[in-house]
Amino acid sequence: MPIPTSRTKNKAAILIDESLCTGCGKCVDSCSDFDLEMFNGKVRESANPVFGCIACGNCMMVCPTNAIKIEGRCLTAGDIFELPAKESVSDYKSLLSLLQRRRSIREFKDKAVEPEKINQILEAAQTAPMGIPPSDVHVLVLENKDQVHRFAEEYSVFLKGMRWFASNWFLILMRPFWGKANDEMMRSFIKPIFGVYVDKMEKGENWINYDAPLAMYFYGSPYADPADPIIAATYAMIAGESLGLGTCMLGAIHPFIQNSKNAEKFRKKWGVKYKSREGLFVVFGYPKPNFKKGVKRSFADIAFVR
């Protein structure tokens, strides 16, 4: 049975040109769904796939003679391109330097992000890996400061109507149901957010998205792998850094616009097509701060299995 997404619910078609097939078997080895098999020295479509072709494109990418094509699930043979030369790829040292230079930026110069850079960020983010193709990541782009500020204003009004969510009586009522850790997080982080976001906005201070010149909201659909929007947002953030932009991930917008009639109205007004298990805002702009040093970060734990 084909794996459904918001974009397609059909499997892809596998087209084989036997006259070009040399029987090398590389396509069979690369297919993790067992869609292909060898028969009489040629590749053919298998009668026993797991799901049916999901259009990962691996078989097309390894075939040395272009004997196999995939059509469907938002993929065509025209989407195949030659890989960049290894010499053009960043080595580990240069990649680590880029990542070490990145800081979360919340103060931006009053300078627009050029359209070509917006397109470059999106181009890079679309290379992000996904659970099952085609990608079910959706992106809302707020491409100038006015749009970003208007979103913050309307989100502040929306959030004001939810302030009961962080009231003492509600937190006391819910503590037995969501446990100690969630209670601590609600009291120490979520409750203050209502004050910072709403009260500051009423004073003309935008602490929601910092009036950044550019913002992107990455979210999924009911079919999406929950990790996909987060990975795509991370790729976009790294791309922004490579283009000389400051970036910051904003995690406190997505959860509040998911579950309620008002949240549905808010999403619809802003062209957000689905509620999503996971999602993330990233803001971009030319940074005001000029950091000279970095801070070493660490994981909570690294355990090697012996």
Image: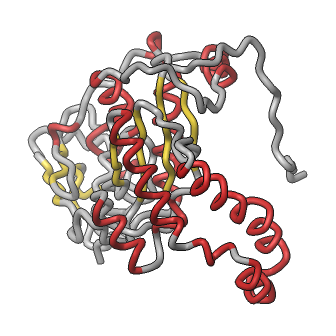
Above or below, comparing residue 157 to residue 100 in the picture: below
Q: Residue at x 33, y 29 (%)?
A: 118
Residue 37 visible in this rendered orientation of the protein: no
Q: Is residue 73 left or right of residue 285?
A: left
Kindly identify the residue that appears in the image at 30 percent across and 71 percent down. 4
Spot occupied by residue 196 in the image (x, y as percentages of width and height): 65, 52
Foreground of the two, 1 or 222: 222
The spot of residue 48 in percent (x, y) is 31, 73
**Which residue is at a point 77% across and 15% down the rendered structure image?**
293
Pinpoint residue 285: horizontal percent, then vertical percent. Answer: 47, 26
Give the image quarter of residue 23.
Answer: top left
The tally of labels here is: 0
Q: Is residue 294 left or right of residue 140?
A: right
Residue 286 visible somewhere in the drawing:
yes
The relative height of residue 141 versus residue 241 in the rendered view (above or below) is below
Q: Quadrant of the N terminus?
A: bottom left
**In this picture, is 110 found above or below 54?**
above
Q: Colour scheme in the image?
A: secondary structure
Place of residue 306 in the rendered image (x, y in percent of width and height, measured from the top left): 90, 51
In the depicted view, which residue is nearer to us: 114 or 226? 114
Compared with residue 277, is residue 41 higher up or lower down, i.e. above or below? Answer: above
- 94 vs 235, left or right, is right
Q: Quadrant of residue 58?
A: top left
| Rendered residue at 58%/44% (across/down) | 207
Q: Nearer the viewer, residue 33 or 100?
A: 100
